[in-house]
Every structure is written in structure tokens, then in C-alpha cells.
Image: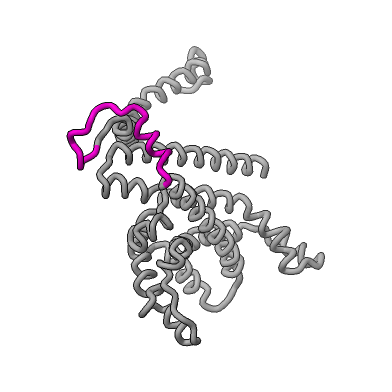
């Protein structure tokens, strides 16, 4: 019954009734919220707990509260700083490669040409290959020093084949990871470039703007927000690269390709030092959250400015 049909029921009372109905439905969300909370807080709480105790599976007699001993040992270990540097190099290099090639491919495949659908499918395909499989493909079929495809190319032109994972281990990992993530950047940027105003492009052509000028003054500014989103999402995932390193170089030679994720794995599951590995896990969570907060704020600021 509406307010006009029943003057005694005011608009305020109707609003209160709607508010009560909304509040009554909120308890239905509690099970999901509780499950998500436990899903996140229990592993994190256990990691923090183990980081403050002595817990080495090879020496079960050595136990008890360690205080900040694990953290002190972690920060004194040169492997931590080497792994942080490798993580920075790997993440930054892959971001640059994926953004540059993703942008160029998006501009290229936005044009009409015969077989464009098949070509787009081939570009996107590497993104659906599992990291372990792609690492095996590059290790055994592409970069193998004896029967790899790159070795065959070098031999066919009279060059000496390169043992990529021995002489250029970090570069090899960067190539493999970039091959996987260029399709992701391509998808996001191609979707963004398709929303570019055609009339604006036609007006620029009429004014005499060439392809290079249109790219830097029209296309690239239009893709700024999409590029920010690509950088934010990729950075979060690139900080945890593991399978490609495990399958190809196992963090070597030495610490040449050991990033923070692989360092935590090697200490926790190869050296069985749970306390030290947990301290590294806490540091990784803190760094990942700092990076995520900075990236989210940067993207939000760019969106508001746009």
C-alpha cells in the first residue's frame, strides 16, 4: 500500500522498514565472511608464530622461543639481499617487456587484415599454458644447447650454440616469463584500444598527424589507465614467480636466479628450517602488501585525474 493510499504510513516509516529488511539479510553474509577470514588469518597467524620459534625438522631437539633470532639471521644472510635484487630485476624487466610488446601488438592487431582472428588466438595462446609446461618447453625444445631450436638457428649461421641457463640464467627466466605474460597485457590493451574514439582519430588524420604522432599523442595517452592496471596485476603475480625457476635453473647457478619465493622454498623444504622460512614468508607478505598498496593508490590517483 502506498503513502497516497494510506496517509498514516509516512515516507520515513517506509524507509525504516526497508532499512530493517536490509539489516536482516546481512547475517546471511557472515558464513562467507568467517570462512574468508579464517582462510586468510589462520595461515598468516601460523606463519607469524613459527617465525618466532626454533623449528628445524633436522634438529628436533632444538626448539623453544627464538624471539627475533630468525629475523636477525635472515637480514644477516646475503642470500636474502641477493634474492630481493633478483626479484626486483625479474619483475621490472618482465613489466617493461610485456607493456612494450603488449602495446605494440595491440596497435598492430587492432587493424583489419586477413586472418586476424587466428593471429589473435596465436598471440593469446601462451597465456593458457601452465608455467611448468612452458618452462619445460623453453628448457628442452628452445634453449637446449644441443638440440634446442635456438641452438639450431645459431649453428645454421655458423655461430656457437649458447648454453642459456648456464651463461645467461636470469635473461632466460625473463624471456620465459615474458612469453607467458605478454598475451595478458595484449588482451587488456587491445580491449582498451578498441574503445578509442574513431572521430578523434579521423580529426587527427585530417589535421595532418602521422602514425607516430597519433600513437604518442592519442593512442598512448588513451592506454594510460589500462597500462596502469596491467602493471598492478602483473606485479602482484610476478613477485611470486616459482615454477619457471624451479624447472629450469633451481635458483642457480649459485644465487643467480633465486628470487624471494624460491629462497623461502629452499630454506623451508630443502633445509627444513621452518622458523627461518616462516620469517622469510612474513617479510614477503609485508613487501607484497606494501607494493600492492602503492600500486592501488597510484592507479586510483590516475583514474581520478583522468
Q: Position of residue 304 (x, y in %)?
A: 64, 40
User: Which residue lies most toward the top here?
Assistant: 8
Q: Position of residue 231 (x, y in %)?
A: 54, 51
Q: Quadrant of residue 180?
A: bottom left
Please say if 23 is above or below 41. Answer: above
Please say if 28 is above or below 216. Answer: above
- Can residue 35 be spotted in the picture? no
- Can residue 300 be spotted in the picture? yes
Considering depth in this image, is 89 or 81 the residue closer to the camera? Answer: 81
Q: What residue is at 51 percent from the left and 60 percent from the top?
A: 187
Task: Identify the main secondary structure in magenta.
Answer: loop
Q: What residue is at 18 percent from the left and 34 percent from the top?
A: 61
Tell whether position 212 is magenta: no
Q: What residue is at 27 percent from the left and 41 percent from the top?
A: 273
Q: Position of residue 226 (x, y in %)?
A: 58, 52
Q: Which of the image's four quarters has the C terminus? A: top right
Q: Which of the image's four quarters has the N terminus? A: top left
Q: Quadrant of residue 197?
A: bottom right
Considering depth in this image, is 20 or 188 the residue closer to the camera? Answer: 188
Q: Which color mode does the image show?
A: one colour
User: Which residue lies most toward the left here?
Assistant: 61
Which span of residues is magenta-colored? 56-78
Please say if 21 is above or below 123. Answer: above
Considering depth in this image, is 224 or 27 the residue closer to the camera? Answer: 224
Amino acid at each position: 500500500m502506498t503513502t497516497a493510499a494510506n496517509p498514516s504510513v509516512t515516507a520515513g516509516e517506509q524507509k525504516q522498514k526497508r532499512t530493517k529488511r536490509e539489516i536482516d539479510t546481512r547475517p546471511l553474509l557472515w558464513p562467507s565472511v568467517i570462512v574468508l577470514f579464517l582462510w586468510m588469518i589462520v595461515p598468516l597467524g601460523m606463519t607469524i608464530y613459527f617465525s618466532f620459534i626454533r623449528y628445524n625438522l633436522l634438529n628436533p631437539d632444538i626448539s623453544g622461543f627464538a624471539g627475533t633470532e630468525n629475523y636477525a639471521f635472515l637480514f644477516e644472510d646475503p642470500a636474502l639481499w641477493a634474492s630481493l635484487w633478483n626479484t626486483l630485476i625479474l619483475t621490472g624487466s618482465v613489466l617493461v617487456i610485456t607493456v612494450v610488446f603488449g602495446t605494440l601488438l595491440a596497435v598492430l592487431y587492432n587493424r583489419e587484415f586477413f586472418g586476424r582472428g587466428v593471429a589473435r588466438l596465436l598471440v593469446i595462446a601462451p597465456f593458457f599454458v601452465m608455467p611448468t609446461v612452458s618452462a619445460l618447453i623453453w628448457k628442452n625444445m628452445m634453449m637446449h644447447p644441443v638440440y634446442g631450436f635456438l641452438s639450431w638457428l645459431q649453428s645454421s649461421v655458423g655461430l656457437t650454440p649458447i648454453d642459456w641457463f648456464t651463461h645467461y640464467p636470469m635473461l632466460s627466466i625473463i624471456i620465459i616469463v615474458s612469453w607467458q605474460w605478454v598475451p595478458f597485457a595484449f588482451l587488456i590493451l587491445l580491449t582498451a584500444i578498441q574503445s578509442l574514439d574513431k572521430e578523434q582519430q579521423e580529426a587527427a588524420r585530417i589535421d595532418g598527424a602521422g602514425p607516430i604522432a597519433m600513437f604518442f599523442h592519442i593512442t598512448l595517452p588513451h592506454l594510460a589507465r589500462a597500462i596502469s592496471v596491467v602493471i598492478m596485476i602483473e606485479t602482484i603475480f610476478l613477485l611470486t614467480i616459482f615454477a619457471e625457476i624451479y624447472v629450469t635453473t633451481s635458483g642457480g647457478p649459485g644465487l643467480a636466479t633465486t628470487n624471494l619465493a624460491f629462497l623461502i622454498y629452499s630454506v623451508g623444504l630443502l633445509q627444513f628450517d621452518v622458523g627461518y622460512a616462516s620469517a622469510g614468508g612474513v617479510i614477503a607478505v609485508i613487501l607484497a602488501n606494501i607494493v600492492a598498496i602503492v600500486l592501488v593508490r597510484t592507479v586510483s590517483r590516475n583514474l581520478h585525474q583522468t
